[in-house]
Image (spheres, grey):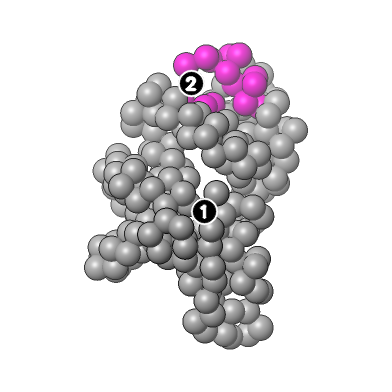
Amino acid sequence: SVAVRAEVVDECGGKKAFVIRAVSAGEVDAMVVERDSEHAAKLFGLAEFGNIYTRIMNPTQVVMEARIAALEGAIARDSTFALAHAQLAGMYIMVLKDRRRADRMITRAIELDPNLSEAYGALGLLRMWIDRDWPAAEQALRHAIALNPHNGVAHHELGQLLMRQARCDDAIPEEERAVLINPGISLFQSGLAEVYLYCRRYDDARREFTKN
């Protein structure tokens, strides 16, 4: 794991903005808005759930719940729909934090289609966000990319994972690839900007943020 320290740079409305610095890994910065420095550091290190940035056009909870209902309905109509299982697993992980149901969906997706890139992408999310097993997360995401090099989500999530390990030389190409595959998608554009920011490429970060 990467040692971090947090420095307060601003305070407003009872919350503080911290700059998180990866002490042992080249002073990689991240902006976090949270209640205290310890919690902020845990968020950056994926030790706790929470946001370390606000993505432009991030879907609301109502939208996310509607997507879950739609995917559950699709599976109810067709229990062999592998992609729906994989996508639902991702929603269970990122929205509900439900490991049990996510693992069941991933297992079923792989049973239905052993070469489904999205299933291994969901497995990478499970290992990254719930299990906190970064080597296993990287292995799953790289396998997803090997199965489908045009899986922009897998490139993006791998970039985010590598960034948190202060592996800037590896993280930046993954986020750049996600944008190249999916030009104009806010999720990937802001992800690239964030990695540039954390890796101290401030001019590049500013340029990418202005595109959103």
Q: Is residue 30 visible?
A: no
Q: Which mark is residue 2?
A: 1
Nearer to me, 19 or 100: 19
Q: Quadrant of residue 146?
A: top left
Report the span colored magenta: 105-121
Q: Position of residue 25 (x, y in %)?
A: 42, 56
What's the residue at 52%, 53% (across, down)? Answer: 2
Instruction: Give the amino acid type for the residue marked by disc 1 in the picture.
Output: Val
What is the magenta segment's predominant secondary structure?
helix
Q: Position of residue 151 (x, y in %)?
A: 39, 33
What's the residue at 65%, 39% (across, down)? Answer: 131
Write down the residue under mark 2.
116
Circle 2 or circle 1, nearest the eye: 1
Q: Position of residue 20 (x, y in %)?
A: 50, 67
Q: Is 114 included in the stretch rendered in magenta? A: yes
Instruction: Give the amino acid type for the residue marked by disc 2 in the picture.
Output: Leu
Outermost residue toward the right in this view: 100
Dot 1: element: loop
Q: Is residue 145 visible?
A: yes
Image side of residue 166 versus residue 135, left or right:
left
Q: Is 110 included in the stretch rendered in magenta? A: yes
> Counting other residues with Cα less than 10 Å from the Cα at mark 1, is it few (<14), some (14-19), or many (20 or more)?
few
Q: CA distance from mark 2 to mark 1?
A: 32 Å
Nearer to me, 122 or 68: 122
